[in-house]
């Protein structure tokens, strides 16, 4: 099948080279590699579901989206990216759902000079902005931005020491690194650091150790329903002090699974997570509400914040589209360079997870409008000021 | 390189055609990338073919060695600024040393313990990669340099393609060379269990370790290539799932064939890529059907082709030529034969106790050169145990066994073999898929000395020719020469027993031990066997045989030793022993 | 670390060990009878937990249509293999067993699920949905290659594992679930606070193990299974059909997997891919016991559980490194102790 299509493609290309058919305006091709299967599937699936909601045409320019699954495997992600760059001549690359896979894409972006939008929070993806990372933008909030919000809340509530329980993987690692940097700077001691597997059947031992260090609060860096397990175990061990979670629990599934044990939990999240609760003045509120309504209508299941990163990546593309079209036709290096410059130069890109302002030295682009603190009260999310 | 021997031009053509893939204009660029990955995986799969398919050791841990290679090169290039080329020796060293250490512990594991051992260390190494600060933990190391050849960057797939496939071609050649050699036969004989190989002087633990390290080196080199093609490393491509996938490639391709490894890697890689683009068109929605269909296809392929796909594929290729016997090859040196009538084996008061059970009770007997001595007795008399004492398989609790003036108590079977004792087995132990000739040549293992490296580099040809010539000579001696190129499993049982005798003769023994050579044979086959043994005796061979069949023994032997309940009850010329009342009692059991 | 903490860790290890033990024992059982190292055992356990969770949420679990699908596949593959001897009777027989049965179960689920059935009923439904999957998988994947080498069968099992993981994701989604405990609450025993569910796990494991013992020792069917395990050829010669014992072993395995799944669902979050690592640990225990002895498997499983719990306490980031590295010296010791002929696998 593939070779057939490729042969067709190369024939078409050949014809184009002969200068016969170059009249139709080329479409913009967007390549998306995400983890629909494997350990990051919980992130990849809502991202996949969001693709269908993206506009097929922006400002009169047709846009085509190509989606491939990388099964949370960096090798596959790189192969997917190379495939789409070679075969689909993509102008813009989005991916991936997991950290190692996204890291591996950075080199491809730099090598092929294709703008890349990453959907994981790791700062090292866009910092420092060097020859490769000029081409990389990042949608999610930095772990640092979110950790800082938590630290602020802890300081305000008189918390002097914190225990950490996190995944033994890139997600847990990213948070741990920030926690160990930011918390001490705010005068909060990190007194216990424990790790666990997403597939572990028990975290009793880790919880015991944290409880015996008796911190004023515990931060759990895990995602989805699994994040409820350490919290339940801590409660069973009789730990009654505040528990913080990360943005990874921003799904209603977490509340459903955690039940009353997760009441009182505080976690940072992007604005889209709590769209309904946002003040009307928040720039992300309206589009977020629209997105959630459409997502749930289309997919018949509750939305998850991870999917919104993909939509935000697309928003960046749309912001840079006009200057790029002025530079060249889609499918050309000029267009891609123009797109990169256009995104970097855009001001106030209003998106689901906040408002992006990129500069030549900052490709993360979010400010405090890109994060809110949420507290679970009686099984409902409430917004903390 | 026998694979390519029969039609070298065809193979050359195929290789050249393959080499053109990157320059043919209508081949889409991504296919070249795909072929680069296939090449990298092929290296690992070829190693697994040797380890699992040929050597019989199942490993789920090859991905860990790929990881060792990749991480070594990643650290050296990214942190210390080495060139990717300069890291290759370090990669080989890391993979080799780590494999030697792991291998020393794990290849000794028997049965199901080995695969579990490999799963265990591949999981623990995965988490080690993910927790070590210097290796970038779970995020790994990115931004690695690409290969660079005299200023030409090999960053693009169409260039690195040649480097990768050069490595694969080299691995194919070296691996097939290795298999087609003295050490190769030793490795191939491991699969049927190590006892037979060990009794012909093969250091089986060493042979296992050799193939284990070799497979790990191939995996390490694959990792080295991977690091600079992918330009980033992280733990996830080196976990246990990847290890399982490599094994899958080897088994699906055909784990007994070097080229099966390449075929397996090709099929698995292309299948996974194509399913992704084909399935959505077939099913309509692009859900996550790839894994499901992939899993089902695996099962179906195994049901259709149990030996993997290579045998089906190879039918369309020219068959490799059988081994050539060079009549001009130098004859192997022979050991001096003891003079007729000289005492060569003396067993004195040998005793074997298993806990409270006395299996052999102070048995003594002697064997003189040029005789056929029979060791007989009813079931459970202790014949096999005595046999195992003499061959060094068991160590006696007490007593002395002297062979050719050396004390052999405490010696290993292969050390006893080196003194000039060769044996056959009650249950035939031939490597089923190996040709009769090669099975027999294994017997001459101790009469050659070339090792793994000279086999890989083809420096062993004159010795190899001598070994094969000797094997052919012995097959001629026992009358199986016309069957020499058939796989051993295709012979009838009687012929297999004769082939075992030929293998034993290849050792150039002064004493031949036969363990129930007539068991399971038809009458005519027994007759032929008796003729052969008598002829060997006439040529000066000394034979000790354990037998059940009184008739067979009576006619053939010069001297009989009769055991019952672990004790010697009679000894002497056959006709004398046959009238001994104690013997009749033991055999006919209390007929009053 | 003090005695109380040690006791807590010990308790935690024993509970996890009990789950590994149940899976390990069924792995031994299936291996002994069919020589298949049935890796997807863990997926069946995960499906057990997820099915129960679906009933609790008032949904029809994905396993119900899946069973119908499997039944259809079975009839279809039998048709392909049989070709001759296909007649009306054959179709009615197979249709009733492989299609109508699963359809009836599905209908029952559709009727009962929205009413959020009582716990015992949900568990019964869950187990009866999963049990038939065992023999169906055996018929589809393993029976046609029943006499292949252990390695080939193992690779086929890996294939089934891949297919199961994909199917699990498709039917249950990527998010994990938890179920309510059979017995809620916490009981003080000495200094320990023991969860009711932990007692359930321990109790059910012991009951299952005793049940298995009685089954193997006292019943004809159990003896036939044991005979097949000891000597396949011999068993066939005395008229024990190895195919049907294989199916039976898989049914038993699936049943125990489903049961353990329903038990762990309330102790931890289970998602579609949780099963692999759990069954891997059961597998470790099974192999440490030489894939032969049931009591040794149980002991080894408890050992793995306790080792895991203690290493999680001392160095949680390196837990798997410690657990799996310590297995190697244990294996070396086992392989020295067990007189194991490495020639039997050929």
Image (cartoon, coloured by chain):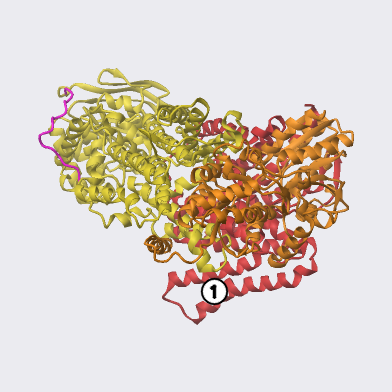
Chain colours: A orange, B yellow, C red
Q: Which residue is mark 1?
A: C94
Q: Along the line of sight, which residue is nearer the eye, C29 or A91?
A: A91
Q: Looking at the image, how many numbered discs can be counted on the residues?
A: 1
Question: Range of the magenta residues?
Answer: B322-336
Q: Is residue B203 visible?
A: yes
Q: Along the line of sight, which residue is nearer the eye, C134 or C50?
A: C50
What is the quadrant of the N terminus of chain B in the image?
A: top left
Q: Which residue is most to the left?
A: B328
User: In the rendered view, would you say B380 is above or below A190?
Assistant: below
Q: Is residue C211 visible?
A: no
Secondary-structure class at tag 1: helix
User: In the rendered view, would you say B93 is above or below B169?
Assistant: above
Name the dominant secondary structure of the magenta segment: loop
Q: Along the line of sight, which residue is nearer the eye, B157 or C56?
A: B157
Q: Residue B486, image x and y in percent?
A: 23, 49
Residue B152 relative to residue B346: left or right? right
Q: Residue C170, image x and y in percent?
A: 62, 61
- Identified at 79% across, 33% down, the residue is A163
Q: Chain of mark 1?
A: C
């Amino acid at each position: 099948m593939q070779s057939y299509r490729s042969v067709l493609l190369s024939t078409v290309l050949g014809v184009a080279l002969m200068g016969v058919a170059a009249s139709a305006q080329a479409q913009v091709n967007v390549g998306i590699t995400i983890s629909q299967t494997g350990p990051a599937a919980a992130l990849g699936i809502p991202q996949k579901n969001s693709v269908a909601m993206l506009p097929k045409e922006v400002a009169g320019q047709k846009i085509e989206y190509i989606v491939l699954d990388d099964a949370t495997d960096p090798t596959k992600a790189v192969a997917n990216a190379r495939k789409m760059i070679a075969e689909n001549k993509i102008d813009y690359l989005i991916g991936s759902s997991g950290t190692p896979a996204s890291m591996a894409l950075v080199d491809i972006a730099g090598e092929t000079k294709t703008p890349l939008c990453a959907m994981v929070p790791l700062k090292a993806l866009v910092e420092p902005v060097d020859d490769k990372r000029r081409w990389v933008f990042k949608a999610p909030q930095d772990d640092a931005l979110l950790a800082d919000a938590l630290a602020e809340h802890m300081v305000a509530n008189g918390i002097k020491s914190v225990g950490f329980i996190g995944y033994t993987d890139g997600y847990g690692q990213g948070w741990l690194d920030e926690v160990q940097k930011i918390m001490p700077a705010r005068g909060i001691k990190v007194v216990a650091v424990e790790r666990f597997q997403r597939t572990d059947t028990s975290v009793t031992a880790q919880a015991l150790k944290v409880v015996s260090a008796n911190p004023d609060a515990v931060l759990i860096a895990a995602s989805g329903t699994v994040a409820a397990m350490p919290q339940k175990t801590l409660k069973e061990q009789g730990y009654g002090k505040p528990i913080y979670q990360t943005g990874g629990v921003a799904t209603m599934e977490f509340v459903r699974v955690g039940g009353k044990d997760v009441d009182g939990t505080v976690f940072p999240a992007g604005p889209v997570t709590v769209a309904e609760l946002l003040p009307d003045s928040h720039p992300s509120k309206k589009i977020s509400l629209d997105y959630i309504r459409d997502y749930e209508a289309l997919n018949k299941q509750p939305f998850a914040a991870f999917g919104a990163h993909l939509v935000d990546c697309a928003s960046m593309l749309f912001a840079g589209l006009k200057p790029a079209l002025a530079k060249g036709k889609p499918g050309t290096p000029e267009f891609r360079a123009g797109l990169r410059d256009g995104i970097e130069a855009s001001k106030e890109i209003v998106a689901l997870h906040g408002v992006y302002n990129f500069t030549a030295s900052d490709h993360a682009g979010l400010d405090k409008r890109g994060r809110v603190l949420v507290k679970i009260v009686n099984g409902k999310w409430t917004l903390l000021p | 390189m026998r694979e390519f021997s029969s039609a070298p031009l065809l193979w050359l053509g195929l290789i050249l055609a393959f080499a053109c893939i990157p320059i043919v204009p209508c081949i889409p660029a991504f296919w070249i990338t795909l072929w680069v990955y296939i090449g990298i995986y092929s290296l690992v799969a070829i190693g697994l073919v040797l380890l699992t398919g040929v050597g019989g050791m199942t490993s789920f841990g090859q991905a860990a060695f790929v990881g060792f290679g990749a991480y070594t090169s990643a650290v050296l290039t990214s942190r210390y600024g080495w060139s990717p080329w300069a890291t290759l020796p370090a990669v080989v060293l890391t993979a080799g040393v780590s494999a030697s250490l792991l291998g020393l512990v794990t290849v000794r594991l028997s049965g199901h313990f080995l695969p579990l051992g490999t799963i265990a260390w591949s999981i623990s190494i995965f988490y080690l990669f993910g927790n070590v600060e210097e290796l970038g933990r779970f995020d790994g190391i990115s931004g690695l340099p690409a290969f660079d050849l005299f200023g030409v960057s090999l960053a693009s797939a169409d260039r690195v393609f040649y480097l990768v496939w050069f490595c694969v071609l080299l691995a194919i050649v070296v691996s097939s060379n290795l298999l087609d050699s003295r050490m190769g036969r030793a490795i191939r004989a491991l699969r049927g269990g190590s006892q037979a190989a060990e009794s012909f002087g093969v250091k089986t633990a060493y042979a296992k370790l050799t193939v284990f390290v070799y497979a790990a080196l191939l995996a390490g080199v694959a990792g080295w290539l991977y690091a600079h093609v992918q330009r980033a490393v992280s733990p996830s491509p080196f976990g246990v799932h990847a290890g399982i996938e490599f094994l899958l490639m080897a088994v699906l391709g055909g784990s007994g064939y070097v080229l099966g490894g390449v075929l397996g890697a090709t099929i698995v890689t292309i299948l996974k890529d194509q399913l992704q683009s084909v399935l959505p068109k077939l099913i309509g929605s692009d859900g996550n059907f790839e894994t499901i269909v992939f899993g089902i296809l695996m099962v179906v392929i195994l049901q259709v082709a149990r030996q993997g796909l290579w045998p089906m594929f190879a039918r369309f290729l020219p068959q490799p030529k059988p081994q050539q016997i060079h009549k001009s090859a130098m004859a192997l040196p022979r050991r001096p034969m003891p003079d007729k009538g000289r005492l060569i084996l003396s067993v004195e008061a040998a005793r074997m106790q298993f806990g409270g059970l006395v299996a052999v009770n102070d048995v003594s007997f002697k064997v003189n050169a040029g005789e056929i001595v029979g060791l007989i007795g009813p079931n459970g008399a202790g014949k096999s145990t005595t046999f195992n004492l003499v061959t060094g398989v068991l160590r006696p609790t007490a007593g002395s066994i002297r062979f050719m003036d050396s004390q052999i108590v405490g010696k290993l079977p292969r050390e006893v073999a080196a003194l000039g004792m060769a044996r056959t087995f009650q249950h035939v132990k031939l490597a089923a898929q190996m040709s009769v000739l090669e099975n027999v040549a294994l017997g001459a293992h101790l009469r050659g000395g070339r090792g793994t490296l000279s086999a890989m580099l083809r420096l062993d040809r004159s010795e190899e020719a001598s070994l094969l010539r000797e094997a052919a000579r012995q097959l001629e001696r026992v009358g199986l020469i016309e069957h020499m190129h058939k796989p051993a499993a295709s012979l009838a049982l009687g012929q297999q027993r004769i082939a075992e005798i030929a293998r034993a003769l290849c050792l150039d023994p002064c004493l031949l031990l036969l363990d129930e050579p007539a068991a399971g044979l038809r009458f005519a086959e027994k007759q032929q066997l008796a003729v052969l043994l008598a002829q060997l005796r006439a040529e000066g061979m000394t034979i000790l045989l354990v037998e059940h069949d009184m008739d067979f023994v009576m006619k053939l032997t010069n001297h009989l030793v009769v055991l019952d309940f672990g004790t010697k009850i009679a000894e002497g010329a056959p006709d004398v022993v046959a009238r001994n009342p104690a013997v009749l009692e033991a055999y006919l059991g209390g007929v009053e | 670390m003090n005695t109380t903490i040690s006791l807590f860790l010990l308790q935690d290890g024993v509970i996890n060990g009990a789950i590994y033990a149940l899976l390990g024992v069924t792995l031994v059982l299936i291996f002994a009878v069919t020589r298949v190292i049935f890796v997807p055992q863990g997926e069946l356990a995960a499906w057990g937990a997820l099915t129960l969770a679906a009933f609790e949420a008032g949904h029809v679990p994905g396993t119900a249509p899946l069973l119908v699908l499997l039944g259809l596949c079975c009839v279809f593959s039998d048709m392909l293999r049989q070709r001759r001897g296909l007649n009306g009777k054959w179709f009615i027989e197979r249709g009733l067993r492989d299609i109508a049965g699963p359809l009836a179960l599905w209908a029952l689920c559709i009727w009962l699920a929205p009413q959020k059935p009582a716990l015992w009923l949900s568990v019964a439904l869950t187990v009866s949905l999963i049990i038939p999957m065992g023999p169906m998988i055996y018929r589809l994947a393993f029976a046609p290659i029943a006499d292949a080498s252990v390695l080939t069968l193992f690779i086929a099992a890996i294939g089934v594992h891949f297919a199961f993981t994909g199917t699990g994701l498709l039917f249950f989604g990527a998010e994990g679930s938890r179920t309510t405990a059979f017995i809620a609450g916490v009981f003080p025993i000495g200094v320990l606070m023991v969860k009711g569910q932990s007692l359930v796990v321990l109790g059910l494991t012991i009951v299952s193990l005793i049940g298995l013992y009685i089954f193997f020792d006292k019943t004809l069917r159990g003896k036939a299974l044991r005979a097949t395990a000891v000597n396949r050829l011999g068993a066939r010669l005395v008229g024990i059909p190895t195919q049907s014992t294989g199916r039976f072993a898989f049914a038993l395995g699936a049943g125990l997997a489903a049961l353990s799944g329903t038990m762990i669902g309330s102790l931890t979050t289970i998602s579609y891919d949780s099963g692999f690592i759990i069954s891997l640990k059961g597998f470790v225990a099974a192999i440490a016991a030489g894939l032969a002895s049931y009591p040794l498997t149980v002991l080894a499983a408890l050992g793995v559980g306790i080792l895991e719990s203690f290493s999680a306490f001392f160095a949680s980031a390196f837990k798997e490194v410690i657990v799996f590295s310590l297995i190697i010296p244990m294996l070396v010791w086992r392989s020295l102790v067990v007189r194991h002929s490495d020639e039997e696998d050929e």
